[in-house]
Image (cartoon, rainbow, N blue to C red):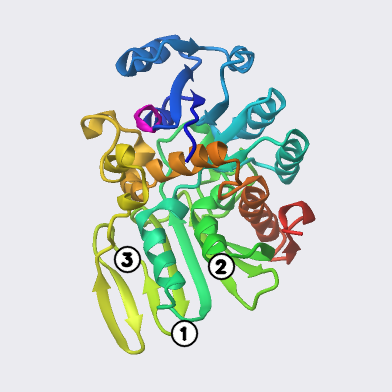
Amino acid sequence: MQNKTINVAIVGLGFGAEFIPIYQRHKNANMYAICQRDEKKLNEVGDAFGIEKRYTNYDELLLDPNVDAVHINTPIQNHAEQSIKALRAGKHVACTVPMATTVEECRQIVEAVQETGLTYMMMETVVYSREFLFVKELYENGELGKLQFLRASHQQEMAGWPGYWEGLPPMHYATHCVGPVVALAGADAEYVSCFGSGTIDAHLIPKYGSPFAIESCHIKFKDSDLAAEVTRSLFNTARQYRESFDVYGSKKSFEWTLIEHQPSVIHTGEVPETVTIPDYAHLLPEEIQAFTTGGVYDGDSNQHLSFLQGSGHGGSHPHLVNEFVSALVNKREPFPNARQSANITCVGILAHESAMDGGKKINLPEFTLAK
């Protein structure tokens, strides 16, 4: 890696603050600025981490010529607008999931990247979790054999979260289960068919016009005989938090544990065995390896709910930072890049559309597919 430093600005300091010390310790990053509308919160975080450059206005931050890249961690309805603004202002973009909330917004981001030549990366945690890296290693080593089927789920109770989550269509926030099946397949999603099931509380339905408690989608991959199924729930479904994926191969299969913190299972024919997932800190620069097994704050009370509820996101945060920064330094595409992020995100958006139309088959748009 070249001796180049990227000036990073983090936008949104709830979940976003988890990444500050990782950037501070990465040898090719300078944690240059932070942005938060709440000035009190802005100064608390800035003082805690010794960050001098602070903004309460996003547009003002984008005018700062010293900012090379922004890492967006704001509410989901702001992701597309803020990503497009940053790209048009000449900044590289890392953005938490999902990329956008409409297919058209995804298209605009992909077009902005194509027109500016800048870098966009959706910071999908699961594809850099230790569980995914473990299964990916098994597959690349040939231990799984031919992939035969993929399944993933993300079940979460969102009661008590900020109001914009209330009644959200489950598949509109599906990247945590779509991402790993697309990534492991190494192929784009070509078309989807999804069914909704059950109903959420009546007072939650009007906000988005979505009645379903659970949405379950089948994905067909382009130029492949492989398919996947993903399931998503947000309200009124009794289930411990679970981000999971199962991988069925011709030689071995991997099934995610049913209960958090218990071992997952490897199947070889009729013989199952439990497996303890190793950590993958060794893939990272030494300076940030410690962040795969520990949060960035001292004490759980200071950590964001998504980090606690999601069991530390599988140690993915330093891998995400390293992928984004190293892609910029080495002038290569990150994974997932803008087009791949659009493919993953549009699966969920179109899956909900399919569910509302009785499971209608819907093709992914051309701009999300590799040429």
Within 10 Å of the Cα at label 2, are there few (<14), some (14-19), or many (20+) other Cα atoms? many
Q: Which residue is mark 3?
A: 258
The span from disc 1 to disc 3 (Cα, nearest Å) is 22 Å
Main SS category, magenta section: helix
Q: Is residue 119 above or below residue 63?
A: below
Is label 1 in a helix, a strand or a loop? loop
Residue 331 at x, y percent in the picture: 60, 40
Q: Which residue is mark 2?
A: 185
Residue 84 at x, y percent in the picture: 69, 30
Residue 203 in sight here: no
Q: Which residue is mark 1?
A: 250
Q: Amino acid at mark 1?
A: Ser
Residue at (39, 71) in percent of width and height: 138
Residue at (37, 71) in percent of width and height: 255
Q: Judge whether residue 23 is colored magenta.
A: yes
Residue 28 in sight here: yes
Q: Nearer the viewer, mark 2 or mark 3?
A: 2
Within 10 Å of the Cα at label 1, are there few (<14), some (14-19), or many (20+) other Cα atoms? some
- Decide which of tag 2 and tag 1 comes sooner along the chain: 2
Is label 3 in a helix, a strand or a loop? loop
The span from disc 2 to disc 1 (Cα, nearest Å) is 14 Å
The span from disc 2 to disc 3 (Cα, nearest Å) is 23 Å
* Left or right, residue 83 beside residue 54: right
The C terminus - image quarter: bottom right
Magenta range is 20-26
Q: Nearer the viewer, residue 355 or 10?
A: 10
Q: Nearer the viewer, residue 22 or 203?
A: 22
